[in-house]
Image (tube, rainbow, N blue to C red):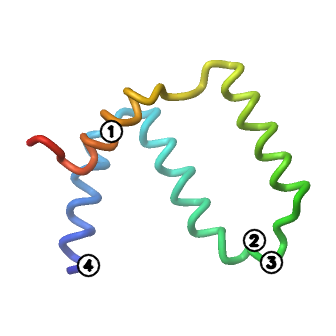
C-alpha cells in the first residue's frame, strides 16, 4: 500500500507548477514539524500566524475557492 501511495504522490507532484509545489512543501514541513512544536505552541504563535496569513491575503497571495477546488480535484484525479 505504501508503495502505491508513494507513486501516486510522486505522480501528482510532477503535475504541479512551481507555486503549487512550494505550497505543498510548506504544508508537508508543517506536518513534520507539528509533533515537535505541539508542546511549545502558544497563543502568541497562533496570533502571529494569523497576522502572517492576513499579510499574505493583503498581498494577493491566496487561492480563490474555485482555484482551490480545481487544485484539489486535479490532485485526487477527480473527473478523470
Q: Which mark is residue 39?
A: 3
User: Residue at label 4?
Assistant: 2
**Residue 48 screen position, x and y as percent:** 84, 46
Q: Judging from the image, what secondary structure is the residue with disc 1 in?
A: loop
Calculate the distance from the C-alpha at mark 3 to the C-alpha at mark 1. Answer: 33 Å
Q: What separation in Å lies between label 4 and label 3 (alpha carbons)?
A: 29 Å
Report the disc number at residue 16: 1
Residue at the image point whose x is 18% and y is 71% from the top: 4
Precedes in sequence: disc 4 or disc 3: 4
Q: Quadrant of residue 40?
A: bottom right
Q: Are marks 3 and 1 in contact (CB under 8 Å)?
A: no
> Is disc 4 surrounded by few (<14), some (14 to 19) or many (20+) residues within 10 Å?
few
Q: Which residue is mark 2?
A: 37
Label 1 Cα neighbours within 10 Å, binned few <14 / some 14-19 / many ≥20? some
- Identified at 54% across, 54% down, the residue is 27
Relative image position of residue 67 (x, y in whole percent):
39, 28
Residue depicted at x 22% and y 53%: 11
* Circles 2 and 3 in contact, beta carbons < 8 Å: yes
The quarter of the image holding the C terminus is: top left
Amino acid at each position: 500500500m505504501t508503495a502505491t501511495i508513494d507513486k501516486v504522490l510522486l505522480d501528482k507532484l510532477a503535475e504541479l507548477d512551481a507555486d503549487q509545489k512550494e505550497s505543498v512543501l510548506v504544508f508537508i514541513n508543517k506536518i513534520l514539524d507539528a509533533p515537535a512544536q505541539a508542546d511549545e505552541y502558544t497563543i502568541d504563535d497562533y496570533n502571529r500566524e494569523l497576522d502572517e496569513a492576513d499579510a499574505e491575503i493583503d498581498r494577493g497571495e491566496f487561492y480563490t475557492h474555485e482555484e482551490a477546488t480545481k487544485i484539489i480535484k486535479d490532485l485526487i484525479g477527480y473527473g478523470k
